[in-house]
Image (cartoon, rainbow, N blue to C red):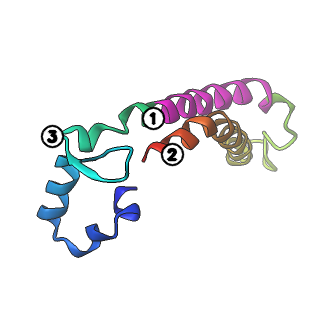
Amino acid sequence: IKQCCDPTYGKLNFIDAMTKFLTSSEDRGGGTNSGGNSGAFDALGPILLKMCPYSAGQLATYEVAKSSLVPLLPFELGLDGLGGGTFASNLVCAALAAVVSSLVSQPGDSLFSEVS
């Protein structure tokens, strides 16, 4: 995100860009100050506030959907009766988990975008 917001990153080589990334941290006035390693970790809190609910929501929703919805799905056994519909049931459960987890993590995503 820092590279998208700061156009000077594109003109730097890898070593200079990483040095700038690791040593700079934005203050709330829009300037840049020397902050040691805080430049790399100043968004760690918002990242965790975004990713922890996302991961927990995705895992929990997938597991609940798999255990409760799959017996209700008509295509679970597939056409051959050998479980050929497993891909379809995994797809339905994964899609449901993706929607729920993106909704759960939206406040953290907004905070992360604001901080970064």
Rendered residue at 40%/56% (across/down): 1
| Residue in front for this viewpoint, 58 or 84 | 58
The answer to whether the residue labelled 2 contacts the one labelled 1, judged by CB atoms less than 8 Å apart, is yes
Crowding at dot 2, Cα within 10 Å, few <14 / some 14-19 / many 20+, comes out as few
Kind of residue indicated by mark 1? Pro
Mark 3 vs mark 2: which is more N-terminal?
3
Rendered residue at 42%/48% (across/down): 116
For mark 1, what is the residue? 46
Badge nearest the viewer, 3 or 1:
3
For mark 3, what is the residue? 36
* Residue 4 magenta-highlighted: no
Tag 3, which secondary structure? loop
For mark 2, what is the residue? 114
Badge nearest the viewer, 2 or 1:
2
| Residue in front for this viewpoint, 62 or 100 | 100
Crowding at dot 1, Cα within 10 Å, few <14 / some 14-19 / many 20+, comes out as some
Q: Is residue 95 above or below residue 66?
A: below
Magenta range is 49-70
Kind of residue indicated by mark 2? Glu
Image quadrant assignment for residue 20:
bottom left
**Residue 111: image tag:** none
Q: CA distance from mark 3 to mark 2?
A: 22 Å
User: x, y (%) of residue 100?
Assistant: 70, 36
Tally of numbered tags: 3
